[in-house]
Image (cartoon, grey):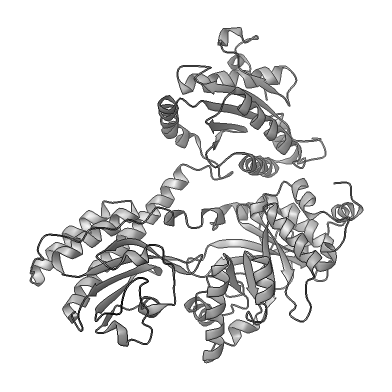
């Protein structure tokens, strides 16, 4: 980096920072941690340096660091280079700029902020008092987070105008891909008030107090925690946002069989059978398709739609559509507040609408005409999770009875329960296949996925690059600095690996300080380039102790099918090459020869190197 300002930041590390959790108001997991100066009034450069030092413990949660305007205007200060020196994953670091309506940021500052965004960092605007007044700033920066001034939630109680302003701001920010965070959440009532208007995240004493890892830094109301505390916390990983919503929407045909007329006893048996079928499914989309098909057996309707609530973007997304006239919903994204669907979702109660055209919240599906129709709007709720909505239409007025509403609600209830269970099953399955320390895949995942990778390679003829990466002298890190420092190094290396690999590649914590990288559609030359990129990324990591000058790794390279008829053979070849790199002096790359017999040296299993 070499700049004077950056060096000053490194030297002015103390005393430190507290980390204020930013909490999901709906499921109470952590989104990230905001760095607060300790003591108050600590120099901005010192706050940045102290926060980045803690970043090795906070990932994969977002670390939000205040960035003063005078720092942005300093020509010799490179915040991106400073973040690289601390091995911070840009996707886990948000730079916070203070909103001052009366003072324009200036074109130069906006350009520097946008440069940070181009490098992969996140942006946040803090202290927004009136979102309508700050729309130019928000539109220019398109920040990932908009922090409201604490006065905004305080004005919501019994103030319909303030509620309308906040609801509009939620939609405005969400349309730009951002998330609103409410400050001043001091009670359950305040949390409920902002959540009902679509705000998903909050900060305040009702949710969590600031955290410090050094007791001498604690101020009144701060909570002292060990660094291991952060790794035990469940966090919301932003790169997974919308993963469940990417599958293309397909129209589901309406049932062609006649609708059965069921008495109460027969309907109860029907519900039991439907519940068993739904609970046996673990694919959310398949659960909704089954529910639509089963509903068609006991209730006639002209159109049906299952919507998922995308809380990150504050939008409804269609998951299952059936019936003529719902085609216009395929590419339509509706706010969680819009239409009769949004109105019923906000109330959280099933609703029977005799005439959709006369309802004050009514809206029209694109490409359709306003025709007489009735609607059942069923919120899909499991526990305290609002998952989505079930809408059922008939093409006539007052066409549904109270019994129809009750039966549709009961089916919606068991559908929501099965949907929630499928989400939890998917999360548990993901955790079972993920290394808790690094967030990379684990060896169990590799045992399941390896044969699929090999089969795909044989079908397509594309090679698969295998890299075995082992950290050098890692035992010295644990012995000299302790296992907490060793864990920090492993997490930093994992972040470096994630920055290098493509979306189509896989990274596995293979065991201890060893990592397996699987490169799809690769050859030896491509695998070597990736290995060199890993060397560069790891060389930029901070040394964990003064006894260890820098973190290095030995890397073995092999390619399927060149180095073996089975993928396990190729991994073994890369493993042998990696130990060859260690024998040659470590901190280097070795490519496995085509014939394993050509590789010199004894079997590394006779005396494994570190």
Position of 535 with respect to 241 (left or right) is: right
The front one of 468 and 608 is 468
The front one of 575 and 364 is 364
Q: Can the viewer see residue 153?
A: yes
Determine the image quadrant of residue 31: bottom right
Determine the image quadrant of residue 502: top right
Position of 363 with respect to 593 (left or right) is: left
Q: Position of residue 401 (x, y in %)?
A: 17, 81
595 over 52 or under it: above or below:
above
State the residue lying farthest toward the right: 4
Q: Kindly identify the residue that appears in the image at 27 percent across and 55 percent down.
A: 279
Determine the image quadrant of residue 323: bottom left
Q: Position of residue 410 (x, y in %)?
A: 23, 70
Q: Kindly identify the residue that appears in the image at 24 percent across and 81 percent down.
A: 372
Picture quarter with the C terminus: top right
Total label count?
0
155 over 482 or under it: above or below:
below
Q: Kindly identify the residue that appears in the image at 51 percent across and 25 percent down.
A: 463
Q: Can the viewer see residue 381?
A: no
Q: Position of residue 422 (x, y in %)?
A: 35, 54
240 over 329 or under it: above or below:
above
Q: Kindly identify the residue that appears in the image at 60 percent across and 27 percent down.
A: 468
């Amino acid at each position: 980096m070499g700049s004077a300002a950056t060096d000053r930041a490194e030297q002015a590390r103390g005393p430190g920072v507290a980390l204020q959790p930013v909490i999901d108001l709906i499921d109470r997991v952590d989104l990230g941690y905001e760095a607060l100066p300790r003591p108050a009034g600590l120099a901005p450069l010192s706050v940045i340096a102290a926060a980045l030092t803690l970043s090795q413990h906070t990932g994969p949660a977002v670390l939000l660091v205040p960035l003063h305007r005078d720092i942005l205007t300093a020509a010799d200060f490179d915040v991106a280079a400073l973040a690289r020196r601390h091995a911070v994953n840009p996707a886990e670091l948000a730079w916070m700029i203070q909103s001052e309506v009366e003072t324009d940021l200036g074109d130069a500052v906006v350009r520097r902020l946008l440069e940070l965004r181009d490098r992969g960092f996140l942006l946040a605007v803090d202290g927004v008092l009136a979102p309508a007044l700050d729309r130019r700033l928000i539109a220019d920066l398109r920040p990932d987070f908009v922090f409201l001034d604490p006065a905004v939630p305080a004005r919501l109680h019994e103030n319909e105008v303030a509620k309308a302003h906040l609801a509009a701001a939620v939609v405005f920010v969400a349309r730009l891909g951002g998330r609103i965070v409410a400050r001043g959440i001091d009670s359950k009532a305040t949390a409920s008030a902002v959540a009902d208007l679509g705000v998903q995240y909050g900060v305040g004493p009702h949710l969590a107090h600031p955290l410090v890892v050094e007791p001498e830094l604690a101020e009144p109301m701060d909570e002292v925690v060990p660094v291991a505390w952060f790794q035990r916390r469940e966090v919301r990983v932003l790169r997974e946002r919308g993963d469940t919503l990417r599958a293309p929407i397909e129209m589901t045909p309406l049932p062609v069989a006649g609708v059965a007329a069921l008495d109460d006893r027969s309907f109860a048996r029907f519900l039991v059978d439907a519940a068993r079928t739904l609970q046996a499914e673990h694919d959310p989309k398949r659960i909704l398709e089954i529910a639509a098909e089963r509903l068609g057996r006991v209730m006639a309707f002209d159109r049906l739609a299952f919507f998922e609530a995308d809380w990150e973007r504050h939008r409804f997304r269609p998951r299952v559509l059936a019936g003529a006239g719902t085609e216009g919903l395929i590419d339509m994204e509706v706010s969680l507040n819009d239409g009769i669907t949004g109105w019923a979702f906000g109330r959280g109660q099933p609703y029977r609408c005799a005439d959709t055209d006369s309802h004050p919240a009514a809206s029209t599906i694109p490409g359709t005409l306003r025709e007489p129709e009735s609607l059942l709007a069923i919120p899909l709720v499991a526990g305290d999770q609002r998952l989505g909505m079930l809408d059922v239409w008939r093409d006539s007025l007052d066409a549904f009875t109270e019994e129809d509403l009750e039966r549709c609600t009961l089916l919606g209830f068991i559908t929501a329960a099965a949907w929630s269970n499928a989400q939890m099953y998917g999360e548990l399955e993901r955790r079972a296949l993920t290394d808790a320390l690094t967030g990379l895949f684990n060896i169990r995942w590799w045992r399941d996925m390896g044969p699929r990778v090999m089969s795909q390679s044989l079908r397509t003829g594309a090679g698969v690059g295998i890299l075995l990466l082992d950290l050098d002298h890692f035992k010295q890190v644990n012995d000299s600095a302790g296992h907490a420092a060793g864990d920090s190094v492993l997490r930093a290396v994992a972040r470096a690996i994630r920055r290098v690999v493509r979306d189509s590649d896989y990274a596995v914590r293979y065991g201890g300080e060893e990592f397996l990288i699987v490169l799809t559609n690769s050859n030896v030359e491509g695998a070597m380039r990736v290995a060199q990129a890993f060397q560069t990324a790891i060389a930029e990591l901070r040394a964990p102790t003064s006894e260890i000058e820098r973190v290095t790794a030995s890397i073995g390279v092999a390619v399927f099918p060149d180095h073996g008829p089975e993928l396990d053979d190729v991994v073994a070849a890369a493993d042998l090459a990696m130990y060859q790199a260690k024998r040659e002096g470590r901190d280097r790359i070795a490519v496995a020869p085509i014939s394993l017999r050509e590789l010199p040296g004894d079997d590394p299993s006779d005396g494994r190197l570190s």
